[in-house]
Image (tube, rainbow, N blue to C red):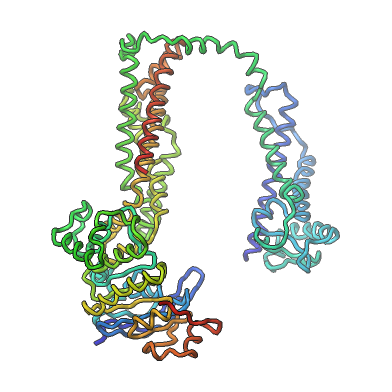
């Protein structure tokens, strides 16, 4: 049964690998036919192939899979932890591999019927005098060939190279522009070198807040979101820990729901939450802080839950044995073990929230970020420079402080 | 009526289909000191945990004072657990908490939930914790963090925690396996004292037969989850010994 699964999944994986390589090849071929770099306004159209040409391509794909499997271990076989051996357990000879390659076509033509009927050793393996075996563990005495002399190693190299090449073209990487167009950014650098602190303390007439006002607002947004987020994540973290919550079906459902909540909320970036709350609560720091809070609850909740799952189970057993109930067990055996890490994570999150408090202004979250984005839109670079310098200073101080506090706690 | 009765107890771990206990029968009188011996993996720990149901037995029954524990609801089981102390091979103290907090945890079953969550214990419980610590000679370590103590001291805190429960039965799972020989005897003597002076029934699993002979009034030997010997320590001769520990084994003395 295990071998059947390994055989099927290895075939699917290899098919995926080769399909990916084919896709990469086509993309590279198409992109290099165009002017370099790729211009987004030109739609990426696949070459129009006749049905016959497509058939040849597909057959080629299948042959590539069968070939790498016969002269394997292929990437799919390696990932499933199996390889082909001859009757005596040694690597198969060339003739056996060729025979296996040939007979595999029959296996493919019958849609793997032989593997289903004889999962241990289907016909094509018998005829070729080979069989599929689990790979020996890395610690065993059998010496493995180096990766660059194996089919899976070379395939993996090919996949990596193809990915880099396609990525390079699709990201429109053009190193010349880094040099030739550098002068365009000069005005910004001048602004940063010569910052204009005219609104440091005096309120900006349009925003009605000075830079310091905005900074203080951002600091408190981050602080409030972190504290409230930590307090909310604390009880949730126990519901999201398998070893505490998932002890019976109802508990398991609670555990799954909590973890699902963490993952869904976490995967929505803070900026998107800010966009939602800016409409819900109106533009301003409240919307920004709420967005930070929501993301913090989910992010800390997940980190906290993982801490709970890694505690020493001994004290839990001991406190349970005294007749304590679940809440008492959590309070006396779990919380003391995780509290220092919780605090460290919360302080780390405060660092992140401070940075994010600036970004949420982009969609109406309030704080010093509003100065930053308004000045940037007006191309007033020396004012931008003032905001960035002030913020850099604050982040340095906070980094240092939080690192120092974390060191004292843990 | 016997104090603890175990009837046809079996435990099969679903994962891996391991037969940890198979049809175990025995009973323990009030105030008896029973020692479990057997190789690692012979089922000693599982047997102890089936008695206070930290591990759910697959089949069979366990009685305490004639009360069938294996039928109790979780809530009722928690009430019974209050009178069953347990000490562990790895001590299982909360390492970051103080000795006093660890000892007070033994009282949780008697404390109502809300005050205990806030860390409030009645005055007499704190008084009792001090008495228990004095009994194991650790009163001066009351406010020390548990991980600052030596192995022997940590196990004595474990004993004090069990004493807080005012137990009628004490389960000891390899209480001295992590300790050196001299400390082992000191810890075993505290357990013996609780057995002799307070009349607490003790069921202890031990690694060394010499310790079992010295402290046990009766010995129960397990092999692959089955009882292969049940009787007084003197009755274990060379032949019995090989039956319990296998042909290769040699008896080691620990003094």
Residue A400 position in % (x across, y down): 40, 30
Q: Is residue A331 above or below residue A31?
A: below
Asked whether the viewer can see residue B80, the reply is: yes
Nearer the observer, A32 or B15: B15
Asked whether the viewer can see residue A379, the reply is: no
Q: Residue at x 66, y 29 (%)?
A: A168
Q: Is residue A199 left or right of residue A54?
A: left
Residue B198 position in % (x across, y down): 21, 77
Q: Is residue B46 above or below residue A272?
A: below
Q: Residue at x 31, y 48 (%)?
A: A235
Of all residues shown, which one is farthest toward the left? B123
Q: Residue at x 55, y 84 (%)?
A: B247
Nearer the observer, A179 or A128: A179
Q: Residue at x 36, y 44 (%)?
A: A342
Q: Is residue A264 above or below residue A138?
A: above
Task: Specify the quadrant that holds the N terminus of chain A.
Answer: bottom right
Nearer the observer, B250 or B175: B250
Task: Specify the quadrant that holds the C terminus of chain A.
Answer: top left
How many numbered marks have been drawn onto this rendered protein structure? Answer: 0
Residue B108 position in % (x across, y down): 23, 61
């Amino acid at each position: 049964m295990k071998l059947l699964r390994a055989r099927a999944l290895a075939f699917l994986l290899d098919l995926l690998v080769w399909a990916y390589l084919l896709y990469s090849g086509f993309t590279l071929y198409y992109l290099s036919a165009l002017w370099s770099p790729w211009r987004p306004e030109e739609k990426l159209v696949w070459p129009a192939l006749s049905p016959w040409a497509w058939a040849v391509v597909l057959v080629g794909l299948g042959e590539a899979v069968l070939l790498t499997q016969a002269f394997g271990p292929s990437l799919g076989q390696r990932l499933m932890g199996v390889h082909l051996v001859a009757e005596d357990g040694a690597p198969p000879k060339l003739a056996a591999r060729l025979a296996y390659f040939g007979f595999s076509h029959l296996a493919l033509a019958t849609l793997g019927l032989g593997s289903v009927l004889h999962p241990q050793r289907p016909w094509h393996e018998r005829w070729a005098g080979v069989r599929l075996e689990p790979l020996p563990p890395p610690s065993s005495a059998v010496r493995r060939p180096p990766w660059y002399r194996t089919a899976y190693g070379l395939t993996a190299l090919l996949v990596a190279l193809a990915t880099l090449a396609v990525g390079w073209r699709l990201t429109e990487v053009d190193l010349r522009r880094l040099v030739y167009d550098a002068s365009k950014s000069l005005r910004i650098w001048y602004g940063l070198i010569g910052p204009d602190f005219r609104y440091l303390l005096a309120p900006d007439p349009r925003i009605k807040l000075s830079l310091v006002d905005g900074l203080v607002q951002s600091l408190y947004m981050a602080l409030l979101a972190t504290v409230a987020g930590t307090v909310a994540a604390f009880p949730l973290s126990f519901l999201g820990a398998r070893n505490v919550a998932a002890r019976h079906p109802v508990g398991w459902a609670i555990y799954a729901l909590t973890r699902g909540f963490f993952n869904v909320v976490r995967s929505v970036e803070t900026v998107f939450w800010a966009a939602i709350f800016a409409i819900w609560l109106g533009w301003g720091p409240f919307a920004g802080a709420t967005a930070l809070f929501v993301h913090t609850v989910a992010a800390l909740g997940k980190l906290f839950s993982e801490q709970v799952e890694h505690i020493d189970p001994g004290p839990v057993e001991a406190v349970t044995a005294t007749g304590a109930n679940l809440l008492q067990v959590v309070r006396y055996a779990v919380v003391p073990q995780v509290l220092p890490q919780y605090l460290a994570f919360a302080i780390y999150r405060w660092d992140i929230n401070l940075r994010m408090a600036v970004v949420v202004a982009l969609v109406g979250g309030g704080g010093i970020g509003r100065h930053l984005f308004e000045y940037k839109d007006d191309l007033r670079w020396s004012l931008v420079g003032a905001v960035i310098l002030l913020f850099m200073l604050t982040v340095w101080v906070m980094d240092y402080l939080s690192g120092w506090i974390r060191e004292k706690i843990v | 009526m016997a104090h603890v009765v175990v009837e046809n107890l079996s435990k099969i771990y679903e994962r891996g289909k391991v037969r940890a206990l198979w049809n175990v029968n025995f009973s323990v009188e009030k105030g008896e000191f029973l020692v479990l011996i057997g190789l690692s993996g012979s089922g000693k720990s599982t047997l102890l945990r089936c008695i206070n149901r930290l591990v759910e037995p697959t089949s069979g029954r366990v009685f305490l004072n004639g009360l069938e524990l294996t039928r109790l609801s979780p809530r009722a089981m928690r009430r019974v657990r209050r009178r069953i102390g347990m000490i562990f091979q790895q001590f299982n103290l909360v390492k970051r908490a103080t000795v006093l907090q660890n000892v007070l945890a033994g009282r949780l079953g008697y404390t109502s939930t809300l005050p205990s969550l806030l860390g409030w214990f009645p005055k007499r419980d704190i008084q009792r914790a001090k008495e228990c610590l004095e009994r194991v000679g650790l009163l001066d370590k009351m406010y020390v963090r548990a991980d600052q103590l030596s192995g022997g001291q940590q196990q004595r805190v474990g004993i004090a925690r069990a004493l807080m429960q005012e137990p009628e039965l004490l389960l000891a799972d390899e209480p001295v396996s992590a300790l050196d020989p001299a400390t082992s005897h000191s810890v075993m003597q505290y357990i013996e004292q609780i057995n002799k002076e307070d009349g607490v029934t003790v069921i202890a699993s031990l690694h060394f037969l010499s310790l079992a002979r010295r402290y046990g009034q009766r010995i129960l030997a397990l092999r692959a989850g089955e009882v292969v010997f049940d009787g007084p320590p003197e009755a274990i001769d060379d032949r019995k010994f090989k039956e319990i520990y296998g042909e290769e084994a040699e008896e080691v003395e620990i003094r």
